Image: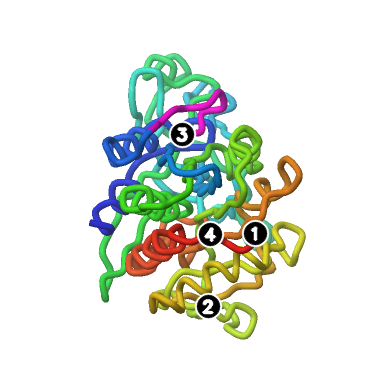
Amino acid sequence: MVRELLKKLSNAHGLSGSEGSVMTIVKRELKGHVDEMYEDPLGNLVTVKKGGDFKVMLAAHADEIGLMVKSIDEKGFLRFVTLGGWYAPTLYNQRVILHGTKGPVPGVLGGKPPHKMDEEERKKGVKVDDLFIDIGARDRDEAEAAGIEVGTPATLDRQVAELANGRLTGKAFDNRAGVAVLIRTMQQVRSPFTVYGVFTVQEEVGLKGARTSAYSIDPDCAVATDVTFPGDHPGIDQIDVPVEMGKGPIITIADASGRGLIASRAMVSWLKDTARKHDIPVQLEVGSGGTTDATAIHLERGGIPSTTLSVPTRYIHSPVEVLDPSDVANAAELLVQALKTRPKL
């Protein structure tokens, strides 16, 4: 079931600020499993399992990185801005889907052919400003007639594929993996506390949904479910990143070298103790890279004890992210078991 859920979520399209198709899947999966479900003014989907006065917030961002049209030239080519952290060479010659006013429109990301680049251009590499989207239109009027306008969002045109050993590759596992963890948790959890499962918006452009929802909910503690990159493949030093895919979810102690989250020790101990008690494999991370919704959450109100539970995922922010579904299943099981006990805050 986890595999099929991951496929549905990854294949869905939900650029920051346009997460609706992902939220539709979440609503369908959680219908009948939660006591309350609503969208807040920013677009966060809040699901609730009611219990006692102690409130736990679980957060998973539903958005993916993508593009947005900023102009259409006279020949019908589209210029765009990136939303979220793209490495420009990753985009070159990819297929995209534009989500226009008349429905989806396929396109390709074009640029100057390498055959026509001089030596200096080759050394500099491809930049976002060098790229454009080609939908096959002959002029601006044809592009507009197809439903394309300034502000049209675009996401990568990729479907999940299966690799050896049950592993999956696809787009947007950052953070559909975390969404899958939260869906499975809310489906299964039986807790004496009130549990808020929040599917947040606009994480990739500034942790925005987590900030507003945490302020409104004012939880006693929080866990963000997200992804992080492992150090188990060429090009990365496992001494610096000593976590691996397929060896369990990852509990964050600190990320972004402490500039993001320094996790609550009580929350870390709560998850570690639960994993030990129930023989669930986990890994620990002190990271120097990016951060998660937990950074925004833990600074709201008077401070909210928080940590992150991540799924190790290779090649994040690319069209070919890779994960092991067992890490997703183990992350959900860890949260389900942890929520039977109260963290010692």
Residue at label 1?
Answer: 290
Mark 2 and mark 3: Cα distance apart in space: 31 Å
Within 10 Å of the Cα at label 3, are there few (<14), some (14-19), or many (20+) other Cα atoms?
many
Which mark is drawn over residue 45?
3
Q: Amino acid at mark 1?
A: Gly
* Callout 3 amino acid: Leu
Kind of residue at badge 4: Arg
Q: Which residues are magenta?
A: 36-46
Q: Which mark is residue 342?
A: 4
Where does the image place residue 37, in percent across and percent down from the top left?
Answer: 40, 31
Name the N-terminal-most of marks 2 and 1.
2
Give the image location of residue 117, x and y in percent: 59, 54
C-alpha separation, residue under disc 3 versus residue under disc 1? 24 Å
Q: Which badge, 3 or 1, is on the more N-terminal residue?
A: 3
- Please check the rendered image and state whether residue 42 is part of the magenta-colored stretch, yes or no: yes
Q: Which residue is mark 2?
A: 243
Tell me the crowding category of disc 2: few under 14, some 14 to 19, or many 20 or more residues within 10 angstroms, Cα based: many
Measuring 47% from the left and 41% from the top, which residue is drawn there?
199
| Magenta span includes 83 | no
Q: Nearer the viewer, mark 4 or mark 3?
A: 4
Q: Quadrant of residue 266?
A: bottom right
- Nearer to us of marks 3 and 1 is 3
Observer-nearest of 194 and 304: 194
Q: Residue at x 53, y 31 (%)?
A: 17
